[in-house]
Amino acid sequence: MTAHNHALVWIDHRLAKLFYLGLDAVERVTIEAHLTTEHLHHKANSIGSGKGEDDPSFFRRIEEALRNKRFSLWVLALRNRCC
């Protein structure tokens, strides 16, 4: 089993990718938000904010994936798609 010394987290509103980095291996975990809709756009003359509901368990599941690990943590919040 490889010891992972670093973790990299790439996150946006609907997807988180966790990479556990070791000297000779990389472990990748993907966590998806459970959203009511993938895309929601506000239209002129319509009622509502045009925003969808957040997944209340999304950040908790990310935290659970990182819990009880010993490593340096790097977090990225980017607008472009990754991997």
Image (cartoon, rainbow, N blue to C red):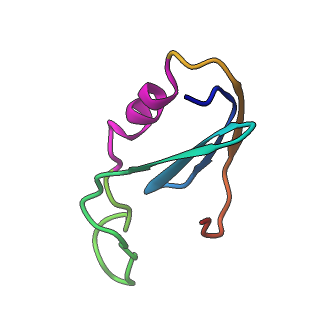
Q: Residue at x 52, y 27 (%)?
A: 66
Q: Quadrant of residue 14?
A: bottom left
Quarter of the rendering occupied by the N terminus: top right
Q: Position of residue 54 (x, y in %)?
A: 35, 48
- Percent of width and height locating residue 17: 53, 50
Q: Is residue 13 left or right of residue 43?
A: right
Q: Nearer the viewer, residue 12 or 82?
A: 82
Answer with left or right where residue 46 lies relative to residue 59: left
Tell which of 82 and 28 is nearer to you: 28
Picture quadrant where residue 24 is located = top right
What x and y, as percent, mark residue 32? 38, 52
Count of numbered circles in the view:
0
- Dividing the picture into quadrants, the one containing residue 82 is bottom right
Q: Is residue 51 above or below residue 42?
A: above
Position of residue 74 in the picture relative to residue 38 (left or right): right
Q: Which residue, as the protein is rendered here, is positioned at the far bottom?
A: 44
- The boundaries of the magenta stretch are 54-67
- Magenta: main secondary structure: helix
Drawn side of residue 61 relative to residue 76, left or right: left
On whether residue 57 falls in the magenta region, the answer is yes
**Residue drawn at (29%, 57%), measured in percent from left and top?**
35
Vertical placement of residue 38 versus 18, above or below? below
**Up-down: is 46 above or below 5?**
below
In the image, residue 22 lies in the stretch drawn in magenta: no
* Quarter of the image with the C terminus in it: bottom right
At horizontal 50% and vertical 50% (from top left) the residue drawn is 16
Q: Residue 18 location, x and y as percent?
A: 56, 44
